[in-house]
């Protein structure tokens, strides 16, 4: 038994000890093979996970048999029909409960109440629909005019790849009505295309430009538009299908012209592509229009509105069902207060399956704020749900998938790719499928995290070297030298302390910072300005020499923070100097001391006076005695006494500093 196990076992009563790695393997094999009930390790305790050693505690808890909590979003939805489907799926085993604890008995009433929550939603405007009243026009002439416009471009010349549709029906006063729909969203070349450069904004200027080109094309074919109805927009593939169905009313034929088609592949599903040739489909069949709309919508770059999310809360199979459901109820009440939601329990009575809660949550709360969860929100939800479960005595841990010692998840398309391609499939797909088949964990790949860590390490190193360089530069102001020297020492110690915390497995964000000494000698505003300019100029010089843009950005951010620290420190010392001047302290003692300090030398240098001491000590002593005598004289005598005119300095007489206070009250008296 190693030192860690010996120390832990010694601290536990009753001679408890940690099981070895082989004990855990035997226990796992016994559990899987059914050779008797699995022996639970004696050290298992709900209190093991701690915030200080989250990773280690989670690993111990997993070894003890405690499951990780599952909180994930199954899907997002929009519209009343999607909400009905989720509510119906929730209620397949037992009735759902809403946010107030009431049972959802009437599904239709619940759907109507949810639909009222979806009134203010925004999706991308992907399809433009224009309706015209024409004097009289034949369908063939209209089709010919629209075909020539498609060859020239709908928005501008060269915009020839867009899908459009039209239908001709009877208009008012014996005229002809033309329904025209144009896909203004970006249509992808295939499903792997992630660009969106060909999208037309749904702005009034763009609609007017399309209207003018369409009007010109119709008049060029001898068709005179009389009026146009207001433009309408719809969103996504469902909006396109709904537009086609609206154009097909009253038995009108709808003509769809597109370059999108499905390429058939033997023994495989079809591939959606946008080809070079345009194809046209003219039909009255409702189902055929739906199928064609789905084909075009498969390559439409769109963003559907999100009205709600379908959330899953799952626990281990051997959990106390009642306490688990209460923990889930408390978590939903705390986390989604102000949002409409409904939840239902599955596998409440089936003890061999994992119990879980299906929750439908409206993304917009009562105050109109939209919920847009990301990976940090999911991590926070797992932590809070696990905390609620542990408060009720359920040994559940918060754990990311990357921290689990298990095989990685494999998606359906990865299974299909590996089945069709075998060893020729991408290496990452092959590794994941093999690890899943062999039930072997894979080491997490965190190349991006390592890269960011190295960048931050280099940036901190550059900041420390820059501060040390200023501290060693004899030509720099002494105020800047002493401040950068203190900052470089404190920054090096602090960064080393955080590195030690990471290396020992502690959370660096929970480490308590240490106080590092910075000098508080009062300085003048001119000294502070010189120190700030020195630091800013040096940081600019170092940043220009960094070739990597990412490293340069991190360095600039770090120096910006250092600059704020320096500014606060220097401003506090200037304020201290101002307070000291206003309090009327003894100027003679402060002047004599500060003149000998580094800050005092900076002050003298900034005033343009060169400090040259004399070799004649008797001459210096007489000057100092005369200055002190003038300082000790009464204020009235000094004010009435005429100041002697400055004599012409002899080149042989060295220059020196008079150690008497200045005459003016408003002048800086600290030096």
Image (cartoon, grey):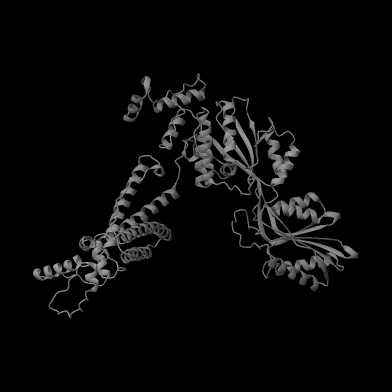
The N terminus: image quadrant: top left
Task: Name the residue: 51% across, 23% down.
Answer: 33
> Which residue is most to the bottom?
648
Q: Quadrant of residue 488?
A: bottom left
Residue 113: give x, y in percent of width and height: 72, 42
Q: Nearer the viewer, residue 99 or 610?
A: 610
Task: Name the residue: 35% across, 27% down.
Answer: 8
Numbered-mark total: 0
Q: Nearer the viewer, residue 611 or 100?
A: 611
Residue 223 shows in the view: no
Task: State whether residue 599 is above or below residue 639.
Answer: above
Residue 506: give x, y in percent of width and height: 38, 40
Q: Quadrant of residue 208?
A: bottom right
Residue 602: give x, y in percent of width and height: 26, 65
Task: State whether residue 549 is above or below residue 435.
Answer: below
The C terminus: image quadrant: bottom left
Residue 347 in the figure: left or right of residue 402 = right
> Which residue is most to the right?
174
Q: Nearer the viewer, residue 522 or 271?
A: 522
Residue 620 in the figure: left or right of residue 497 = left
Task: State whether residue 307 is above or below residue 470.
Answer: above
Task: Name the residue: 50% across, 45% down.
Answer: 428
Q: Nearer the viewer, residue 434 or 653?
A: 653
Q: Quadrant of residue 531?
A: bottom left
Residue 170 shows in the view: yes
Residue 652: give x, y in percent of width and height: 12, 78
């Amino acid at each position: 038994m190693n030192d860690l196990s010996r120390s832990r076992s010694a601290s536990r009563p009753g001679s408890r000890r940690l099981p070895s790695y082989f004990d855990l393997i035997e226990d796992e094999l016994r559990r899987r093979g059914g050779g008797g009930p699995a022996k639970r390790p004696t050290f298992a305790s709900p209190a093991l996970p701690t915030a200080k050693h989250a990773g280690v505690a989670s690993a111990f808890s997993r070894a003890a048999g405690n499951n990780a909590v599952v909180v994930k979003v199954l899907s997002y939805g929009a519209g009343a029909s999607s909400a009905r489907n989720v509510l119906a799926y929730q209620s397949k085993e037992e009735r759902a409960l809403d946010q107030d604890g009431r049972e959802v008995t009437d599904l239709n009433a619940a759907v109507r109440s949810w639909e009222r929550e979806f009134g203010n939603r925004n999706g991308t405007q992907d399809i433009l629909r224009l309706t015209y009243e024409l004097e009289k026009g034949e369908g063939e002439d209209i089709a010919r005019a629209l075909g020539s416009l498609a060859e020239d471009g709908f928005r501008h010349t060269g915009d020839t790849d867009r899908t459009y549709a039209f239908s001709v029906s009877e208009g008012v006063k014996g005229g002809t009505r033309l329904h025209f729909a144009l896909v203004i969203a970006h249509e992808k070349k295939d499903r792997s295309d992630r660009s969106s450069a060909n999208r037309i904004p749904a702005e009034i200027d763009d609609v007017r430009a399309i209207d003018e080109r369409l009007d010109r094309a119709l008049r060029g074919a001898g068709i005179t538009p009389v009026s146009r109805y207001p433009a309408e927009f719809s969103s996504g593939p469902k909006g396109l299908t709904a537009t086609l169905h609206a154009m097909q009313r009253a038995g009108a034929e709808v003509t769809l012209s597109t370059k999108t088609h499905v390429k058939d592949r033997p023994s495989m599903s079809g591939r959606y592509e946008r080809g070079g040739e345009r194809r046209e489909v003219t039909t009255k069949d409702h189902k055929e229009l739906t199928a064609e709309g789905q084909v075009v919508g498969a390559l439409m770059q769109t963003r559907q509105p999100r009205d709600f999310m379908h959330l899953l809360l799952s626990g281990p199979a051997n959990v106390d069902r009642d306490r688990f459901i209460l923990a889930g109820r408390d978590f939903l009440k705390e986390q989604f207060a102000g949002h409409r939601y409904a939840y239902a329990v599955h596998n409440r009575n089936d003890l061999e399956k994992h119990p879980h809660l299906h929750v439908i949550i409206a993304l917009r709360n009562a105050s109109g704020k939209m919920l847009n969860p990301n990976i940090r929100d999911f991590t926070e939800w797992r932590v809070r749900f696990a905390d609620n479960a542990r408060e009720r005595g359920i040994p559940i841990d918060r754990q990311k998938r990357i921290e689990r010692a298990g095989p990685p998840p494999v998606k359906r398309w990865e299974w299909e790719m590996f089945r069709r391609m075998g060893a020729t499939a991408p290496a990452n797909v092959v590794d994941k499928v093999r690890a899943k088949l062999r039930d072997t964990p894979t080491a997490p790949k965190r190349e991006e995290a390592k890269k960011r860590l190295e960048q931050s390490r280099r940036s901190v190193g550059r900041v420390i070297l820059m501060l040390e360089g200023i501290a060693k530069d004899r030509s720099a102001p002494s105020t800047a030298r002493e401040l950068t020297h203190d900052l470089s020492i404190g920054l090096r110690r602090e960064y080393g302390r955080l590195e030690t915390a990471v290396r020992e497995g502690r959370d660096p964000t929970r480490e308590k910072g240490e106080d590092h000494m910075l000098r508080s000698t009062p300085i003048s505003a001119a000294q502070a300005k010189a120190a700030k300019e020195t630091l800013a100029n040096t940081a600019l010089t170092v940043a220009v020499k960094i070739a990597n843009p990412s490293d340069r950005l991190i360095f600039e951010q770090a120096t910006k923070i250092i600059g704020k620290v320096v500014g606060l420190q220097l401003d506090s010392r200037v304020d201290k100097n101002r307070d000291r001047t206003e309090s009327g302290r003894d100027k003679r003692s402060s002047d004599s001391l500060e003149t000998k300090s580094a800050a005092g030398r900076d002050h003298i240098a900034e005033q343009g006076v060169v400090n040259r001491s004399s070799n004649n000590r008797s001459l210096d002593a007489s000057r100092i005695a005369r200055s002190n005598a003038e300082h000790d004289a009464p204020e009235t005598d000094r004010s009435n006494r005429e100041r002697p005119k400055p004599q012409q300095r002899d080149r042989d007489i060295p220059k020196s500093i008079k150690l008497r206070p200045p005459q003016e009250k408003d002048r800086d008296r600290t030096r």
